[in-house]
């Protein structure tokens, strides 16, 4: 527990001075205030992560694909054979998976971590052999992991994050591989959010209705057993409670990703979360260290219902929503250019003063706010090419105030509470 405790102790809140400087800089850039919506708040938060404005560009970036098998596979929750986990690891290492294609597209490095694949994998470039166990046990019959296995897997994730950062990576992305891991994810999300099994259990790799019904029952049974047999009492102080729940129904890759998040936060490096497996793991990390949430960027929202529940609990707004349900780190990689864009704006966009562009506030012209529904004829939007000096910023009063929230349908209004 010493490494976990030290890592948690190293996680500090966001740097308010750097965030204030980023917010003030955004207000001076040659664009209407708030016109970049969620990306502005993301850039501001990344300044708080790094403790400097502008924050460093999120490059080079690395995606760590944590691979492990699950004993609950024996309950018939997926038609895919368990051997596919190891076979896909070989595919990752050969560069033939979707994660590899997306990583090449955005210039990210792929590292594969064997934290619990059943059977032995031969040594190969790009593979980190960090096996804690040959998969988990069947969580319907007993704890998925021992307390020691859960702890060691979390430590693996912390160490992988540390090593990638020491190699010079400035942004980490989560990836995963494990047949039946959406079942364990649903159980974790239900355990940490209090949601019902049927509300957080999805169709995973495209199972039929009968298998889905079976999967829901398996999750429900595992939760009932876990909540009565957990070795940590309700309200246990420190990491014992979250780690006990993790050991009961989680996977070795969930534990490692939770550690990966903690390790990134301790080193003040942003971590872009992938889908439902990462969301479940992030719930564990944030239960262990609430401040770690601010270092997480939700890359996308998965088609799995549990992911939406996890993101709502974490108060994270996804950058991409394409109904993905692949895993591997694919959604996080697709979001990486948006993260980079949020930072690059603070580095490269000119201010009104440096570009010789009139700022409406500096000009002191009182014009009606187009977003308020009046005086639109008297104000010309500077993005249309006309003089910007006579325009009232349509975003005055809050970032994204006039736009519907694509992640939830309703406008969140207060930008400070909108976590990307």
Image: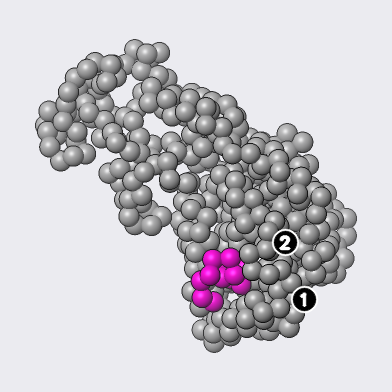
Secondary structure under the numbered disc 2 in the rendered image: helix
Total marks drawn?
2
Q: Which label belongs to residue 334?
A: none
Q: Which residue is mark 1?
A: 137
Q: Which residues are magenta?
A: 186-197
Please rate how many residues cluster around mark 1, counting C-alpha atoms within 10 Å: few if below 14, some from 14 to 19, many from 20: many
Give percent across and percent down for residue 402: 27, 44
The residue located at (42%, 25%) in the rendering is: 24
Q: Which residue is mark 2?
A: 240
Give percent across and percent down for residue 139: 71, 77
The main secondary structure of the magenta stretch is: helix
Left or right, 365 with respect to 243, comes to: left
Asked whether the beta carbons under mark 2 and mark 1 sit within 8 Å of each other, the answer is: no
The residue located at (52%, 27%) in the rendering is: 17
Vertical comparison of 345 with 407: above or below: above
Left or right, 386 with respect to 419, comes to: left
Please rate how many residues cluster around mark 2, counting C-alpha atoms within 10 Å: few if below 14, some from 14 to 19, many from 20: some
* Mark 2 → mark 1, Cα distance in angstroms: 20 Å
The residue located at (25%, 35%) in the rendering is: 394
Vertical comparison of 220 with 313: above or below: below
């Amino acid at each position: 527990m010493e490494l976990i405790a030290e890592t948690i102790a190293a996680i500090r809140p966001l740097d308010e001075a750097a965030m204030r400087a980023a917010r003030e800089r955004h207000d001076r850039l040659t664009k209407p205030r708030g016109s970049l919506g969620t990306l502005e708040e993301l850039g501001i938060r990344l300044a708080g992560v790094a403790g400097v404005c502008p924050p460093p560009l999120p490059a080079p970036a690395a995606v760590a694909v944590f691979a492990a098998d699950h004993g609950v596979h024996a309950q018939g929750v997926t038609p895919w054979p368990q051997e596919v986990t190891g076979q896909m690891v070989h595919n990752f290492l050969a560069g033939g998976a979707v994660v590899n294609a997306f990583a090449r597209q955005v210039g990210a490095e792929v590292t594969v971590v064997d934290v619990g694949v059943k059977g032995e994998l031969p040594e190969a470039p790009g593979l980190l052999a960090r096996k804690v166990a040959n998969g988990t046990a069947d969580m319907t019959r007993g704890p998925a992991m021992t307390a020691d296995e859960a702890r060691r897997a979390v430590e693996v994730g912390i160490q992988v994050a540390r090593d990638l950062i020491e190699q010079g990576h400035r942004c980490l992305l989560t990836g995963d591989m494990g047949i039946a891991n959406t079942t364990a994810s649903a159980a974790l999300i239900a355990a940490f959010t209090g949601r019902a099994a049927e509300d957080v259990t999805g169709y995973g790799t495209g199972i039929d209705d009968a298998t889905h019904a079976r999967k829901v029952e398996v999750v429900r049974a595992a939760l009932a057993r876990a909540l009565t047999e957990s070795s940590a009492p309700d309200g246990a102080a420190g990491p014992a409670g979250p780690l006990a729940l993790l050991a009961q129904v989680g996977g070795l890759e969930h534990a490692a990703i939770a550690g990966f998040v903690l390790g990134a936060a301790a080193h003040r490096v942003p971590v872009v979360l992938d889908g439902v497996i990462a969301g479940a793991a992030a719930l564990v990390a944030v239960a262990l260290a609430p401040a770690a949430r601010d270092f997480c960027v939700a890359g996308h929202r998965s088609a799995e219902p549990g992911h939406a529940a996890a993101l709502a609990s974490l108060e994270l707004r996804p950058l991409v929503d394409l109904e993905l349900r692949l895993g591997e780190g694919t959604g996080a990689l697709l979001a990486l250019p948006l993260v980079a864009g949020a930072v690059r704006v603070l580095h490269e966009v000119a201010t009104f003063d440096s570009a010789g562009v009139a700022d409406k506030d500096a000009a002191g012209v009182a014009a009606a706010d187009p977003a308020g529904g009046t005086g639109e004829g008297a104000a010309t939007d500077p993005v249309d090419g006309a003089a910007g000096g006579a325009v009232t910023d349509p975003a005055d009063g809050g970032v994204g105030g006039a736009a519907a929230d694509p992640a939830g349908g309703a406008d969140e209004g207060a930008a400070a509470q909108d976590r990307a």
